[in-house]
């Protein structure tokens, strides 16, 4: 039968008393009362010292436990991933942020190879980092792309430092957003350079025509060789170039206005929208004989409307200009207009090259051109962006229907009064 805890305690007590008896000197019994009192005092002092030491130990232990909890919390809840890695990349320990980056439960990560969470092309980069860290015993960094179960591409920066002979500590930071921002800045810079180049080209073309024909007309010797009809044609070319420059300047002013956070200021006035459309289409037909323009107005509709005529003319001219640019010579461009009790709707249809769904998604972006590979197609890529801003400022809506090779239809509607409906609906 096994001894009980009570038996063990009794045995320990007996052995302690036996040892005490053996340690007693023969003259212990002859101690005086003073000696006994001094011994008792010494024992009491030692007891108090032990109690004080115990209190200090308890206080120190509480502080250590508090610091441990504090630094454990700092480790666990740090915004970046902390990893302890072996020389071969095996994970020994990680924090919550590290587990979240890898999309794996924290308890399952120890024993896993870190490289299994890195895309295959970047695995040699990680291997080189670990080798360099353990060979040089200094801190090194690299960037890799993670391959995680959530299918979201993440770029991380790993900064590793050797901590022991067989381990290193790595700080893993998600830099996906930072890298995307840098790429966006590069794209913006490229777009700006492209815009400057396009703007210079667009301004130079009409300016060259204006200067060229003006010089001809100003030189009596040269102009005298041309008939009056020919001179009139020169003047029309000069006027056309001037209008082209005016449109470009208008576009740049609108974009600058919007860029600085200012709303487009409208100067609304009541007008007959049908007559406005008729004037614009007739003018375009005269200036662009390469295409056929047809206006179809709903005869039974009252098209009285409150709009900023200058801005809406700018929209329609942009849309007609796009239709001309992207449709073959001799083809028809149809402008249809109708109205109901609270709005007027315009559809501009062409039989041009059309657009893919991906192109339609981008047409409102600044500087975007549907066929940017065709240098013969002029424009700054601002027209649709500006058109939408102006339509929205009126409280209207605009959308595009198109298919590759089947032409494009742009539809916009405007409220007939100043009580605008929501353009985003």
Image (spheres, helix red, strand yellow):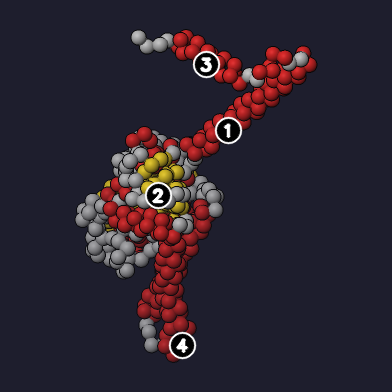
How would you rate the neighbour count of disc 4 (Cα within 10 Å): few for under 14, some for 14-19, many for 20 or more? few
Q: Of tags 2 and 4, which is closer to the observer? A: 2
Single out the mark in the foreground, 1 or 4.
Answer: 1
Query: Mark 1 vs mark 4: which is more N-terminal?
Result: 1
Helix, strand or loop at mark 4: helix
Provide residue 99's location: percent of width, then percent of height: 39, 39
At 59% from the left and 28% from the top, the residue drawn is 62
Q: Which mark sits nearer the N-terminus, 2 or 4?
A: 2
Q: What's the CA distance linking mark 1 and mark 2? A: 27 Å
**Mark 1 vs 3: CB contact within 8 A:** no
Please report whichever mark, 1 or 3, sits nearer to the chain's N-terminal start. 3
Decide: few, some or many residues near mark 1? Use Cα within 10 Å; few <14, some 14-19, many ≥20: few
Q: Name the residue at the left extreme.
A: 405
User: What residue sits right under mark 2 in the picture?
Assistant: 166
Q: Which residue is mark 3?
A: 15
> Which residue extends farthest right?
34
Q: Which mark is residue 220?
A: 4
**Tag 1 residue:** 64
Q: Quadrant of the N terminus?
A: top left
Gap between marks 2 and 4 measured at Cα = 93 Å
Q: Look at the numbered disc 2 and give the secondary structure of its residue.
A: loop
From the viewer's perspective, tell me whether residue 43 is left or right of residue 154. Answer: right
Q: Residues within 10 Å of mark 3 (few under 14, many from 20)?
A: few
Asked whether 419 or 305 is in front, the reply is: 419
């Amino acid at each position: 039968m096994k001894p009980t805890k009570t038996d063990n305690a009794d045995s320990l007590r007996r052995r302690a008393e036996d040892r005490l008896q053996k340690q007693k000197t023969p003259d212990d019994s002859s101690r005086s009362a003073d000696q006994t009192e001094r011994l008792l005092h010494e024992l009491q002092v030692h007891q108090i010292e032990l109690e004080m030491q115990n209190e200090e130990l308890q206080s120190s232990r509480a502080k250590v436990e508090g610091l441990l909890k504090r630094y454990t919390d700092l480790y666990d809840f740090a915004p970046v991933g902390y990893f302890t890695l072996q020389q071969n990349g095996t994970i020994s320990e990680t924090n919550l942020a590290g587990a979240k980056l890898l999309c794996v439960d924290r308890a399952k990560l120890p024993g896993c190879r870190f490289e299994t969470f890195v895309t295959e092309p970047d695995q040699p980069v990680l291997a080189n980092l670990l080798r360099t860290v353990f060979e040089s015993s200094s801190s090194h960094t690299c960037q890799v792309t993670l391959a995680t179960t959530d299918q979201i591409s993440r770029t991380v920066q790993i900064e590793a430092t050797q901590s022991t002979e067989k381990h290193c500590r790595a700080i893993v930071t998600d830099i996906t957003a930072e890298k995307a921002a840098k790429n966006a800045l590069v794209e913006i810079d490229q777009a700006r350079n492209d815009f400057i180049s396009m703007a210079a080209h667009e301004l130079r073309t009409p300016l060259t025509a204006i200067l060229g024909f003006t010089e001809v007309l100003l030189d009596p010797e040269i102009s005298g060789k041309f008939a009056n009809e020919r001179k009139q044609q020169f003047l029309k070319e000069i006027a056309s170039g001037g209008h082209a420059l005016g449109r470009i300047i208008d576009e740049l002013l609108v974009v600058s206005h919007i860029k600085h956070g200012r709303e487009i200021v409208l100067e609304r006035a009541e007008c007959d929208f049908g007559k406005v459309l008729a004037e614009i289409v007739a003018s375009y037909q005269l200036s662009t004989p390469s295409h056929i323009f047809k206006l179809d107005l709903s005869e039974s509709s009252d098209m009285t409307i409150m709009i900023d005529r200058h801005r809406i003319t700018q929209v329609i001219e942009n849309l007609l200009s796009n239709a001309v640019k992207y449709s073959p010579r001799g083809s028809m461009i149809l402008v249809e207009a109708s109205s109901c009790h609270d709005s007027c709707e315009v559809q501009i249809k062409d039989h041009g090259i059309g657009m893919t769904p991906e192109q339609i998604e981008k047409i409102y972006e600044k500087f975007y051109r549907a066929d940017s590979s065709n240098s013969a197609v002029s424009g700054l890529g601002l027209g649709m962006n500006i058109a939408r801003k102006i339509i929205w400022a009126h409280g209207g809506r605009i959308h595009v229907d198109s298919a590759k090779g089947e032409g494009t239809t742009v539809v916009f509607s405007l409220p007939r009064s100043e009580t605008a409906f929501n353009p985003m609906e």
